[in-house]
Image (tube, rainbow, N blue to C red):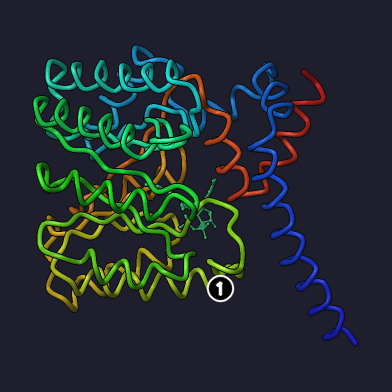
Amino acid sequence: MPFVGYWAGRTLGLYGARMLRSMLLAAGRSPRMRALAEGSAPLRPLVDRFVAGTDLDAALPVIAGLATDRLVTVDHLGENTTDRAGVDATVAAYRALLLRLAPEGLADRVEVSVKLSALGQALPGDGDRIALEHAAAICAAAARAGTTVTLDMEDHTTVDSTLEILQTLRREHPWVGAVLQSALHRTEADAADLARAGSGVRLVKGAYAEPASVAFTAKAEVDEAYLRCLRILIAGAGYPMVATHDPRMVEAARAMAVVHGRAADDHEYQMLYGIRTAEQERIAASGDRMRVYLPYGADWYGYFTRRLAERPANLAFFLRSLITR
Ligand code: FDA
């Protein structure tokens, strides 16, 4: 009987965690919840844990501090932008950021990450063309600054468009980095395709709520798929970027790198700003390459809810903050 009770509790726990994740990701798309969260002063300390300030002046000292022992990729927050003015503002923000890197002596350790949905991909009509033009302008600005760009990956409906834009950008800038999500059924094939010489690929588990028709929905399946994709990338000829906080994945990557004779400068580990900071420092001190993904900007709500969905332990604090605003 205790055995039955254990499994009943465990099933409920797993089911509950999955439901909570879906609810949080849905809250990330709710304008009403966004307005509540943005007006909540008690929430600010939790947001600050994941977001390095609302503007560049606040973010730059944080970036410089991290860059003393780690590499950094900087994300100007914003996504699913459906008005031209918002898209133009995002491009201007990236240009301003890139202009500051070289004078601050950061260009060799700091690159940028961009979301194509903030650059026009979400605009009706010719969104893909507009996103490509803007991404190309940001890549040109990055080249002038002496650094590189990675294209973040968003929900599954954008993957074909993002990979096509990636290939077009790489004709002129072969260093543009890709992101693949192990949660998607298609990703092993995409990893095999992208594991080519000179191709940088950040492998993540995937932060979006995806339907079972295109994605693994059980965490264990996503984890196993991560290991399969990791093997493809590390055995391949490209530059793998192992983006995870999961100790099991990091250990597996380290073992695979040894088996495939990868040197410390031939792959890198990546984690998000504010998560497992001591582990980031430990990896950097061990001589491996460690990069921190650092977001800043006023449009933090969508990013923030994805971080909560990854760790519902923060949810109680989130709800309390909304109630006691
Ligand atoms: P998992 O979720 O299994 O977490 C492993 C452990 O890490 C947890 O047990 C906990 O200890 C810790 N942890 C994880 N998330 C935490 C959190 N939010 N707060 C506190 N602790 C946490 N996704 C995407 O779809 N497109 C993208 O472009 C990117 N880009 C990206 C860049 C980088 C550098 C990273 C590290 C991640 C992304 N992601 C992403 C997010 C990614 O898809 C995934 O949602 C998170 O990394 C969480 O998955 P883990 O691999 O960390 O494992």
Label 1 sits on residue:
220
Quadrant of the drawing holding the C terminus: top right
Q: Residue at x 34, y 47 (%)?
A: 280
Q: Residue at x 62, y 47 (%)?
A: 309
In this picture, is 92 found above or below 51?
above
- Tell me where residue 100 sits by quadrant: top left
Residue 148, percent from left and from top: 17, 37
Mark 1 near ligand 1 (CB under 8 Å)?
no
Task: Tell me the crowding category of disc 1: few under 14, some 14 to 19, or many 20 or more residues within 10 angstroms, Cα based.
Answer: few
In this picture, is 39 found above or below 157?
above
Q: Residue at x 23, y 32 (%)?
A: 67
Residue 34, percent from left and from top: 67, 27
- Tell me where residue 28 sits by quadrant: top right
Furthest toward the top, the residue is: 57
Q: Amino acid at mark 1?
A: Ala
Number of callouts in the render?
1
Secondary element under disc 1, as helix, strand or loop, is helix
> Residue 67 or 294: which is nearer the viewer?
294
Quadrant of the drawing holding the N terminus: bottom right
Q: Residue at x 47, y 71 (%)?
A: 185
Residue 38, percent from left and from top: 64, 20
> Residue 258 or 111: which is nearer the viewer?
111
Residue 131, percent from left and from top: 33, 34
> Residue 127 or 261: which is nearer the viewer?
127
Decide if residue 51 is on the left or right side of residue 108.
right
In this picture, is 316 found above or below 245?
above
Furthest toward the right, the residue is: 1
Decide if residue 52 is on the left or right side of residue 198.
right
